[in-house]
Amino acid sequence: MTGRDKRSVGELLLESDHMARSILMDVDEMDAAMMLRTWGEVVQAAGELWQALPPVTPPQPLTGEHLPDSTDLAIQQLAARSEAMHRTGRGRAWPGDGPADERLLRIAESFARAADLISRHATASPPLSEPEQRDLQAARTRIMHTLYIGSHGVAVAVGQRARELEMKMAARGALTSGDSLRHSRAAHARLTAFEQHAGAVLKGTYPRALAGEHREPPAATRLAHALASWDIQAHRTLTRRLNTADLMLTARTQSVVLAACTTLTRVAADVGQLDRQQYTTRLSPAVETSQERWETMARLWKDLTPPHSRRVDTDLARAALETRAAVHELISDGTTIAHASAIAQRTDLSRIGRLTQQVLATNLDLAHATHDATTNPELTGAARAVNALAIATRRHDPRDVQTRDDSPLAAWVTPRDLLANRAVPLPDHVRSSLTAAAGSLVDANMTAMSAAASLDHVSAQDSQTRQNGEPSARRGRALQDRLPNSMSTGRPASRCER
Amino acid sequence: MMSADQRPTDPDAANSLGTVARLLARASDLAWDQAATNPDPVLRLLGLGLDLATSQALELLPAGTDADQPAPAETDPLKLLRAAEELTRLYRIEDFPPGTSHLIATICDLLNEHAP
């Protein structure tokens, strides 16, 4: 650091935060090895800065010593984890020696500069005033926040590298010198654990599952697990509480799941894992109609959700988040849909038929749960949407005696409710129109499920073809080829690592 | 208590977080409106991501916070998402309620995934 740097501790910490965010936003363009090499320096500098801060706990009566509080212990744990990770990584081919990441280096420098400023101006055992104590807490929060955002960025970059290596290995059967899938996976797992720990500190809750380090399951299993958890949680939430925001999120998540289903089945049909004729004539149109109906329901639920009640059930949101992440990982490449060959490398296409059947069975069940919600007398809706629907549905019924010249003879919603757009009970004919829309959803999903039933025969035919000695060269990778070593034998497989 | 900072949330920062929630909610509505005429699955992933970010923002605010009004005039979901991120920079992280870091990470992830 030069003597010309006039920034305050607060400014240095703010810059570190902004730098960590910019890394996260550009993480696709960054070099995982460079980031991993530099990350240890960031954590070390953060630990030293933390040490330079005055203690937050009162001195012990006899010794005058300050015991660490739980956040002090957390930063010590994080620093120890990081140091251990870098010690194990030393001397390995990956990330190996090489240039450092400039932005992470600047964060480390800012932390070091801040530590230096504090050390030079600190007085011995100062009794801190209340504003000083607030500043101290603020500095601790900023350091932890930067570590959290930064570790997330490094974990994303390293995770992407691990996926690239998985694909490379699937394509070539071996990795070249300097590439280590095992080390990438291990680094990713440790960074994820670090991120969880820092995140838990910031949330004010102690991390629950840090004893064993987090391991990212293979993509296909991740999607299957995410969908199973989504199925369970959506049913739990929809039976526990009746809320249009939850119904909207359910419908939109189903739309994403079905969009993924369309993409995956198309790729599977392209490589001969599903019967193309069945896919084109039955499955694809049925799944697309089902998706359209979910989106129609989602629009209705969105309109019926009062602006003050848009918050969704936390558990439902968490399950939707994981489902979205699993789908994104599998079918996206940046801002576009991944090429079929990339999707084939990421997942076991021979399992797509069965997965589709499970998805469409869940789909139908959730459609029934949605239908049940529309018939529940406790269901309410935002006053303006209820009024608009009431007018629209009456207008389309020429036999209705309560409408004359397209105008209602009586108001369905009070002006006060309309003004506040608060939740109001549904008039019968509005409820009927909702139930009818949910009925169409159920019908579409029944058709989709029965279309998927034919996939069984295709799978059987396919396996028969394989037994007859005509394996397709473009089937995607077999499941055992994609399992990480730790999940198969616990030891590196031959040709897996150098 | 594990939280690094127990200071009360700055009212201006909380207000700004309310605007972040509205920007995200509007961005989500616009993304799903576009999805109605565009079959691209990526648009749906963006819409759902924005829904979940909106929900995360609302979790940090008092129950009953209005996520719709006043609606921003901008009609590009990604510009709204970027505006939401920029708004979170106006205040220091410790001025926001605990948990805001997670929201910021979510917003940055969405920008990384969807903003070219």
Image (cartoon, coloured by chain):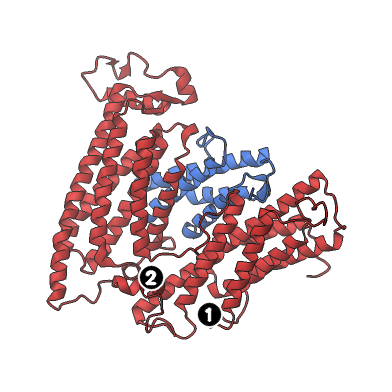
Chain colours: A red, B blue
Q: Do discs 1 and 2 share a chain?
A: yes
Q: Depth check: A112 or B39 in front?
A: A112
Instruction: Say which residue label 1 marks.
Output: A94
> Where residue B7 appears, x then y in whole percent?
69, 43
Write down the quadrant of residue A424 in the picture: top left
Is A414 on the left-hand or right-hand side of A120?
left
Q: Amino acid at mark 1?
A: Trp
Whether A192 is drawn above or below A89: the answer is above
Q: Residues within 10 Å of mark 2 (few under 14, many from 20)?
A: few
Write down the quadrant of residue A457 in the picture: bottom left
Q: Depth check: A122 or A424 in front?
A: A122
Q: Is residue A17 visible?
A: no
Q: Identify which residue is drawn at 62% across, 63% down.
A: A78
Disc 1 is attached to a residue of which chain? A
> Where residue A430 appears, x then y in whole percent?
31, 26
Q: Secondary structure at mark 1?
A: loop
Instruction: Say which residue label 2 marks.
Output: A487
